Image (cartoon, rainbow, N blue to C red):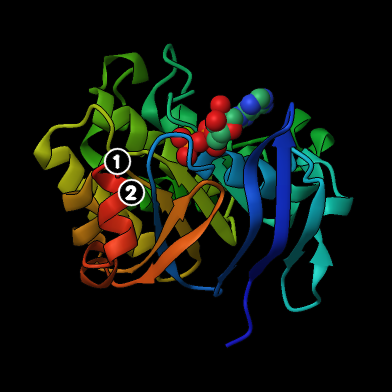
Amino acid sequence: MTSLLEVSGVSVSFDGFNAINNLSFEIGPAELRAIIGPNGAGKTTFMDIVTGKTRPDEGHVLWGGMNKSLLKMNESQIAREGVGRKFQRPTVFEDQSVFDNLMMALKKNRAPWSVLFYRQSAADRARVAELAEEIGLSDQLHRKSGELSHGQKQWLEIGMLLAQEPKLLLVDEPAAGMTLAEREHTTDLLKEAAKTRAVVVVEHDMEFVRRLGCKVTVLHEGAVLAEGSIDHVTQNRQVIDVYLGR
Ligand SMILES: Nc1ncnc2c1ncn2[C@@H]1O[C@H](COP(=O)(O)OP(=O)(O)O)[C@@H](O)[C@H]1O
Ligand SMILES: [Mg+2]
């Protein structure tokens, strides 16, 4: 398998503290991967490095079949390459409807002049309907986004990212603050999205990770401690010790 993203030997320190420590990580083009690890393990910093927000002190971050270096690109160039990132706090436009938020996300792909002369085409409306279906908000299209539940806002934001057709979607703790039913829907949605692109999910909730049913990477002190199925990693002695704080 040729990988979509290959991180190798990456290190970064903040004021002498090694947040990422010789980290290597690979993900395939249509792979779902969970990243777990204790607070401060470097999970968010890993995403910051891939998206160009943080520059590593050492190592390589290679992208796509042509092995382009993401370290030579800025944040917006990396986003244009097809790396989408969802932050913990949703950033939907609360005064706009679900439909309008999705439509704006579709338009974001286009050149500024095309937005100026923009008319909603039937194809765009159909794409918005398809995205709404994918995130389970078909019956909420005309609601103001501010009226949605916390979980629904998270799904809307995932839909807005999917509108950009990323090749890699990075999602940081999507299940935080969700009800059990919302968490279940989120698992299904991410599994579905990973059929056509790579999805990396950082998550604390073990049941959530178990339901994802994918390969798990355990980070600890900025490096990979264990990798494999959820059963494999949760039986790993070192992982147990880290989680029990030994
Ligand atoms: N910009 C920064 N400046 C200084 N320290 C940082 C910065 N970003 C992260 N850190 C530190 O790096 C470590 C890893 O943080 P983080 O990646 O947020 O961990 P996680 O997401 O796994 O909880 C933490 O000790 C954190 O305090
Ligand atoms: Mg974090």
The amino acid on which the numbered mark 1 sits, given as a three-letter code, is Gly
The amino acid on which the numbered mark 2 sits, given as a three-letter code, is Val
Spot the residue most to the bottom. 1
Q: Determine which quarter of the picture holds residue 60.
A: bottom right
The structure residue drawn at horizontal position 48% and vertical position 29%, both measured from the top left corner, is 101
**Crowding at mark 1 (Cα within 10 Å: few <14, some 14-19, many 20+):** few
Q: Nearer the viewer, residue 109 or 47?
A: 47
User: Which quadrant of the rendered structure holds the N terminus?
Assistant: bottom right
Secondary structure state at the residue bearing disc 1: loop
Spot the residue most to the front. 246
Q: x, y percentage for residue 67?
A: 79, 73
The structure residue drawn at horizontal position 41% and vertical position 63%, both measured from the top left corner, is 33
Q: Which mark is residue 245?
A: 1
Q: Determine which quarter of the picture holds residue 165.
A: bottom right
**Crowding at mark 2 (Cα within 10 Å: few <14, some 14-19, many 20+):** few
Q: Determine which quarter of the picture holds residue 120.
A: top right
Spot the residue most to the left. 181
* Left or right: 47 in relation to 59: left
The CA span between labels 2 and 1 is: 5 Å
Query: In this figure, what is the number of numbered marks?
Result: 2
Q: x, y percentage for residue 26?
A: 58, 70
User: Which quadrant of the rendered structure holds the C terminus?
Assistant: top left
- The residue singled out by tag 2 in the image is 242
Q: Nearer the viewer, residue 238 or 94?
A: 238
Secondary structure state at the residue bearing disc 2: helix
Q: Is residue 63 visible?
A: yes
Q: Are marks 2 and 1 in contact (CB under 8 Å)?
A: yes
Q: Is residue 194 visible?
A: no
Relative vertical location of residue 175 with respect to residue 190 in this rendering, above or below: above
The structure residue drawn at horizontal position 54% and vertical position 75%, both measured from the top left corner, is 28
Q: x, y percentage for residue 12?
A: 72, 43
